[in-house]
Each structure stands twice: as structure tokens, then as C-alpha cells.
Amino acid sequence: MSLSDDNRKRLEKVIREYDFAHAEPYLLANAKQTILWSGAAPGSDPEIGGSRAGGEPDLPPGTQWPLGASGVPLTFVMQLKLEDVQGLDPERRMPERGTLFFFAGDYDLTVEHRVLHAAPEQMQGAARQSPPGPTAHDEYAGPFKPRRLVARASLDLPGYAYVDEEATEDEEHGWEEYEDLGFALRADEPAAVAKMFGYAEGQHGDDEYRAALELFGCESTYYPEEAIDRLTAAFDGDRERALREIAGIVMLAEIDSDSDVGFMWGDAGVLHYFIRAEDLLAGRFDRTTCSFYSS
């Protein structure tokens, strides 16, 4: 989807100010409309059912705490009240009501995880729930501290792993100038605990490929062409579908390391949740992948 009028004007203004007219068509075509979640002021009391990172989840009655394959309870990461993002997502990419709950286990190449969705009527009887025992991350991270989250709309330009340098660089503009452009776009924004729908932080730009491979039961690889070949084989030779599936992978959430909450993913890295666009719109949060990146 093309940018909303407000986002287009905002990006065009920064492009003019930073003299990036040579890259304007590329930037307008590849900027992503995102939602950022920032921590509220310290001491603000997280309400039952409200958007929050860390602490304990406000689960609907009868909801069982998710367990990993070994029986260890997964660690609660955050809950997002979808009503908080109404009006912030011009592409209307997900259900507009209800609450999402994110859980994670120990991390390897992929992370054991669960994403739950509760409808508003289910949340009427929600209550704060403690885990049935020590969770996957308690041993080395301890319980995460609760922090209320506030949503806002933002824009995301292709990062290091995704940018087409031939489109953005010339004799006067290199990576540093491009970084400055991105910083200017976010100049008035507080630090985010989580980001939805943007570009994944990383060095290789292969996250969507690996997510598609996992979702369709294919062996993982770091090489995009190999990933396309494996998906093509899984789709009985339909290469066009393989390409569509990769293009349709959405970053549901990127959760940053955060000292206020206690998040520490590897060496100050990020936790990623991915989902197919059509599953997101349909509320199929049982079909997600989770991975982490740490430099």
C-alpha cells in the first residue's frame, strides 16, 4: 500500500531538508508505515488489560499458561491492546479489537513461542496470572518488570540489511548521510520498546525468507536463493507462489532489549515475531515464527 498523505508529506519534508531528491522515488516506494510502542512514564500503574511489557499477563478466564516442548512455562514478554492502535495503521493490517499476548522460550536459531489473541468479550473477566513455575528466561534474566506501553504511528526506512545502496548513494551521499536522514525522521520520537510492521534489525535481510521456510516446514538456510528453491519445491514447483509468500511475511513485532523492563535478548539484541499478512488479517496468531538477532 502507498503511504498515507500525512506520512508522504512527512517523508517528503525530510527528503528536502537532507537533500535526498535523487533517492526520493525509492524512499517513497520502500518506506514502511509502522507502529512503535514506548514505555510510559515510570510509576504509571499498568491497568488490567492494558498494553504492557513485562510483569504478568492479564489472561482471560480458563486460559492455560503456554508451555515449551520440555514442559517449562514460556516467559511472558508483552501484551498489546489492539484498540490502542486504532487510527495509527492506515493499512488496517490486523484485527482492530482484542489483546495480543507474546510469550517466548529459550532461543536458538528459532525460538519456542506463543502469540495468543483474546477478543474483547473474553477480556471482560481477565485477571493478572502468575506462571505455574519458573519460566524459560527466569534463570538468567529474572522476572521482567512491568511497564505500561503507549502506541504511536511512525515510518521506517530500509536499514543496513535491506537498503539498496545504488538507489540512495551518490558522490555526496553515503551511508552516514542516509543514517542521518533516518534519524531526522524519528527525531521527536522517544525510544521504542517494540516496533510493528517495519524492517527487521539485522545484518543479512534474510528474516522473511527464514520465517517463510519455518512456516511451511522447510529446512532453514541463510541464502535467499536456496530459500526460494526450497519453498518452490514445497509448492510443487510454483516459484511465483514462493516469491509471494516471502513478500507477504510481516514483522508482527520487534522487541528491543530494554533495561527498564529487564529485556536482554542475547548481547543487547532484539526478539522478532513474524506472520503471513493474510494470517495476520484473519487473526491466525497460531501461525507465527519467532527468532532473535544479536550482533
Image (spheres, rainbow, N blue to C red):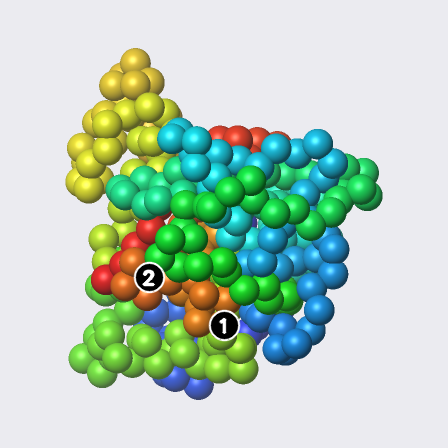
Left or right: residue 222 versus residue 20 is left
Amino acid type, residue under disc 1 in the picture: Asp
Q: Residue 269 carries which label?
A: 2
Q: Residue at x 32, y 45 (%)?
A: 107
Name the image quarter holding residue 159: bottom left
The x, y position of residue 45, in whole percent, is: 71, 69
Disc 1 crowd rating (10 Å Cα; few below 14, some 14-19, many 20+) is some
The vertical placement of 187 against 137, above or below, is below
Q: Residue 132, how many percent across, how many down?
A: 56, 40
The reply to whether discs 2 and 1 touch (Cβ–Cβ < 8 Å) is: no
Question: Pointer 1: what residue?
Answer: 260
Residue 175 against residue 78 in the figure, above or below: below
At mark 2, the secondary structure is loop
Quarter of the image for residue 10 reads bottom right
Could you say where residue 135 lies in the image, as x and y percent from the top left? 46, 46
Q: Is residue 6 left or right of residue 193?
A: right
Quarter holding the C terminus is bottom left
- At 48% across and 82% down in the image, what residue appears? 187
**For this rendering, which residue is in front, 292 or 185?**
292
Q: Which amino acid does label 2 sit on?
A: Gly
